[in-house]
């Protein structure tokens, strides 16, 4: 398993080993001991699976507030996404900054998005399927969203001239500066 920090050092690209032969392949996409050895010792409690029929489906930017904040481990089993994380820890030297990586079934890579970061993705291919593990259960009362087109964050989504397909919730999500509740940077992560 290869672990690479991205543009925001807490956000990681994870490349699990993949072993192939004439039958197909085998891969450990998650191993608690290997993750712990890499400094990632959270317990995942829920798996989510999304399917997007078209290229240009944009989901996010989403996060949950404490006590239901979530670490996420995102992987693609079919297709490809432009996966984005935004630092939303007030007081962080990187507050409002973003990083991204193309995550795909072909590359067999994953992205780890820790608590204190908003997450979103854009499908780059039709019929894309995303599976992601989360470290806490879904809580509608704690769920929040930031507008994908927030000019202060200025994410460079690879839309190539197409209009993204959004949920009603994501279309009207407020900007980061208008979020009354976020995370606080404690110097080593987040505090609630």
Image (cartoon, rainbow, N blue to C red):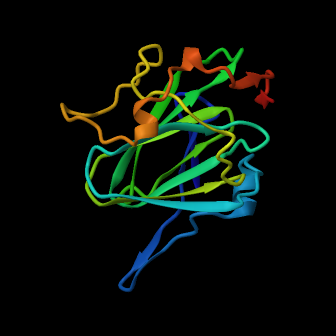
Q: Residue furthest left?
A: 161
- Number of dots carrying numbers: 0
Task: Work out whether residue 119 or residue 38 is closer to the camera in this orientation and state it.
Answer: 119
Residue 44 x %, y %: 71, 58
Q: Quadrant of the C terminus?
A: top right
Task: Work out whether residue 35 or residue 128 is closer to the camera in this orientation and state it.
Answer: 128
Give the residue drawn at x 36%, y 40%. Answer: 166
Give the residue drawn at x 52%, y 70%. Answer: 27
State left or right for residue 128 relative to residue 4: left
Q: Is residue 52 visible?
A: yes
Q: Is residue 101 visible?
A: no
State left or right for residue 56 relative to residue 69: left
**Could you say which quadrant of the image residue 78 lies in?**
bottom left
Would you place residue 144 above or below residue 21 in this image?
above
State left or right for residue 89 relative to residue 188: left
Task: Work out whether residue 148 or residue 178 is closer to the camera in this orientation and state it.
Answer: 178
Would you place residue 25 above or below residue 44 in this image?
below
Give the residue drawn at x 29%, y 58%. Answer: 53
Would you place residue 103 above or below residue 162 in this image?
below
**Could you say which quadrant of the image residue 104 lies in?**
bottom left
State left or right for residue 171 relative to residue 67: left
Residue 64 x %, y %: 66, 40
Would you place residue 182 above or below residue 3 in this image?
above
Residue 154 x %, y %: 41, 19
Residue 152 x %, y %: 47, 13
Give the residue drawn at x 26%, y 34%. Answer: 159
Q: Quadrant of the N terminus?
A: bottom right
């Amino acid at each position: 398993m290869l672990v690479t920090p991205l543009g925001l050092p807490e956000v990681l690209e994870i490349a699990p080993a993949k072993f192939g032969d004439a039958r197909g392949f085998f891969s450990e996409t998650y191993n608690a001991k290997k993750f712990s050895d890499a400094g990632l010792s959270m317990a995942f409690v829920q798996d989510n699976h999304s399917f997007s029929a078209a290229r240009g489906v944009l989901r996010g930017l989403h996060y949950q507030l404490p006590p239901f904040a979530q670490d996420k481990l995102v992987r693609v089993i079919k297709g490809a996404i432009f996966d984005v994380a935004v630092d939303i820890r007030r007081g962080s030297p990187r507050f409002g900054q973003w990083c991204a990586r193309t995550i795909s079934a072909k590359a067999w890579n994953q992205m780890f998005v820790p608590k204190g970061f908003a997450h979103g993705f854009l499908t780059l291919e039709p019929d894309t399927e995303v599976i992601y593990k989360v470290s806490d259960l879904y809580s509608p009362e704690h769920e929040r969203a930031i507008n994908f087109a927030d000019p202060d964050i200025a994410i460079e989504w690879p839309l190539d001239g197409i209009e993204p397909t959004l949920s009603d919730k994501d279309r009207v999500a407020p900007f980061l500066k208008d979020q009354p509740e976020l995370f606080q940077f404690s110097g080593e992560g987040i505090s609630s």
